[in-house]
Image: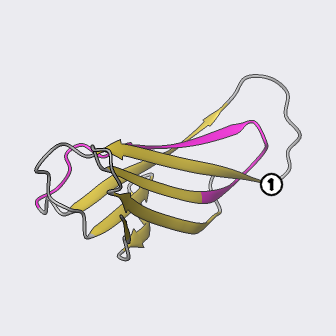
């Protein structure tokens, strides 16, 4: 169902007050405006605790939708537990295939 994913960004917000929050956003081209996109943490996470693995899910909402390519924005937010490792990269998967690898995760403080 997905054909193109663009504009992926991730950042870690360490501004007071605690806790820190990680944000990941991107645009996904979908078959119609009734498709919702969302990200979840992949299970299992993998052997490197500094690389976050996420799965992209596309869900068709019920109803009649015009079949026109549309852009769906996807967002993921995670409150970082105390003393958790800082992520150095994020991998995003769709249907078992890696569609994006984000290495630049700026820290906003």
Residue in the picture at 40% in, 49% down: 55
Quadrant in which residue 108 is drawn: bottom left
User: Viewed as shown, does residue 96 lie left or right of 35?
Assistant: left
Q: Quadrant of the C terminus?
A: bottom left
**78 or 98: nearer the eye?**
78
* Neighbourhood count class around disc 1 (C-alpha, 10 Å): few under 14, some 14–19, many 20 upward: few
Q: Which residue sits furthest front?
A: 16
Helix, strand or loop under label 1: loop
Asked if the magenta segment contains residue 41, the reply would be yes
Magenta residues?
27-47
Residue 18, position as x, y percentages in the image: 27, 44
Q: Which residue sits furthest right?
A: 66
Residue 50, position as x, y percentages in the image: 18, 63
Residue placed under numbered mark 1 in the picture: 69
Residue 106, position as x, y percentages in the image: 38, 72
User: Viewed as shown, does residue 12 lie left or right of 71?
Assistant: left
User: Viewed as shown, does residue 82 lie left or right of 79?
Assistant: left
Residue in the picture at 74% in, 49% down: 31
**54 or 98: nearer the eye?**
54
Asked if the magenta segment contains residue 33, the reply would be yes
Residue in the picture at 14% in, 45% down: 82
**Residue 85, placed above or below residue 82:** below
């Amino acid at each position: 169902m997905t054909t193109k994913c663009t504009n992926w960004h991730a950042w870690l917000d360490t501004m007071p007050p605690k806790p820190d929050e990680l944000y990941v956003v991107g645009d996904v081209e979908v078959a119609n405006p009734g498709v919702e996109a969302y990200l979840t943490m992949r299970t299992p996470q993998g052997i490197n605790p500094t690389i976050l693995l996420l799965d992209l899910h596309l869900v068709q909402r019920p109803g009649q939708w015009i079949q026109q390519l549309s852009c769906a924005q996807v967002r993921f937010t995670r409150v970082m537990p105390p003393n958790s490792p800082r992520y150095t990269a994020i991998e995003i998967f769709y249907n078992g295939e890696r569609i994006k690898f984000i290495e630049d995760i700026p820290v906003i403080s």
